[in-house]
Each structure stands twice: as structure tokens, then as C-alpha cells.
Image (cartoon, rainbow, N blue to C red):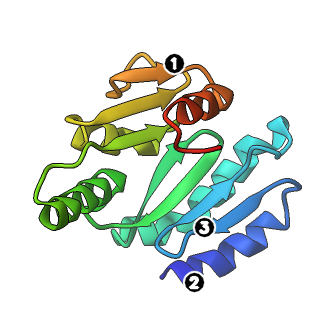
């Protein structure tokens, strides 16, 4: 299904300067950050038309983010479930509950903020309705924070 959608989106991408497709293997991300602002409504209309049958048949769902549409298989799975699964597996290996750290900046990260609520969750950029416990202003502050933790050089 995703490979078929990818081909159709390739055709759409070439009609709009600045549009990009990111194949994440499990999902597809259609980025329109660089598309001329006046062209976005037309792009959105054509994007919706391209995915209409897939969505109507409940094969995929679309998550809207920061100038991105993420096409996901219509399954009950998200970043939150994945993060929780990793933490649970680590618990089995270490025989203790690991401290989780999740940093995100988009709507698709909210599931992880909810599922990993017993850990450290950080939203990059202020968002009033975020489930994250903490906030960092921008990616530069993320780097400073990770350096402070000695996670990166």
C-alpha cells in the first residue's frame, strides 16, 4: 500500500517546487515546508484526492504536523507504543525500570509524551496543550541540554 501511495505522491511532488517525500519504511512523510505558501491549498486538495480511496478504505491515516503530512498504516501503533515497548524490553534485560528520555517537537510526539509520562518528556517549542513535562525553546537548547547530560559532545 505505501509503495503505491509513494508512486502517486512522487507525481504530485513534481508538480510543486519544494515538496519532498521522506520514506520512513513504516510511514511516509510528505513535507511541504518549502512549497510556495500560495500553492499549499491546491497541494492539500490534490494530496487529499490522492489519498481519498486509501483513507476511505481505512488502509491509512494521515497525521498533520509542522508543514508535514505523515501517512501511516491504519494500525494502533505510534511513537508512544514504540517507546514503551523499548522501555519494557530494557526492564527485562536490566531487571529495573529504566529512566526514559523523549524529546520531540511535533504533534506526532504527543503519543510518546503520554505513554512515557513516568520518564522525562520534553517538548521543543512551547505548545499549550502538550503532554510533555518540560519544554526547551529550540533545537539549540536541546543540544545544550544533551551536552549538559554528557550525551553528546
The residue nearer to you, when weighing 152 against 108, is 152
Pointer 1: what residue? Answer: 126
Within 10 Å of the Cα at label 1, are there few (<14), some (14-19), or many (20+) other Cα atoms? few
Image side of residue 153 versus residue 61, left or right: right
- Name the element at disc 3: helix
Eye-nearest disc, 2 or 3? 2
Find residue 14 and report its horizontal and vertical position in percent: 84, 67
* Residue drawn where x is 65% and y is 42% of the image: 67
Looking at the image, residue 150 lies above or below residue 7: above
Eye-nearest disc, 2 or 1? 1
The residue nearer to you, when weighing 99 against 138, is 99
The quadrant holding residue 146 is top right
Sequence-wise, the earlier of marks 3 and 1 is 3
Question: How many marks can you see?
Answer: 3
Pointer 2: what residue? Answer: 4
Marks 3 and 1, how far apart in space?
33 Å
Looking at the image, residue 41 lies above or below residue 132: below
Amino acid at each position: 500500500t505505501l509503495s503505491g501511495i509513494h508512486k502517486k505522491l512522487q507525481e504530485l511532488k513534481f508538480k510543486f517546487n519544494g515538496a519532498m517525500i521522506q520514506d520512513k519504511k513504516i510511514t511516509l512523510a510528505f513535507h511541504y515546508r518549502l512549497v510556495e505558501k500560495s500553492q499549499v491549498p491546491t497541494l492539500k486538495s490534490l494530496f487529499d484526492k490522492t489519498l481519498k480511496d486509501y483513507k476511505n478504505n481505512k488502509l491509512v491515516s494521515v497525521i498533520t504536523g509542522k508543514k508535514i503530512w505523515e501517512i501511516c498504516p491504519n494500525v494502533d501503533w505510534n511513537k508512544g507504543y514504540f517507546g514503551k515497548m523499548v522501555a519494557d524490553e530494557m526492564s527485562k534485560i536490566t531487571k529495573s525500570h529504566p529512566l526514559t528520555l523523549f524529546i520531540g517537537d511535533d504533534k506526532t510526539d504527543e503519543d510518546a509524551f503520554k505513554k512515557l509520562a513516568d520518564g522525562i518528556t520534553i517538548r521543543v517549542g512551547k505548545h499549550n496543550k502538550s503532554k510533555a513535562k518540560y519544554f526547551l525553546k529550540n533545537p539549540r537548547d536541546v543540544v545544550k541540554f544533551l551536552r549538559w547530560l554528557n550525551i553528546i559532545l
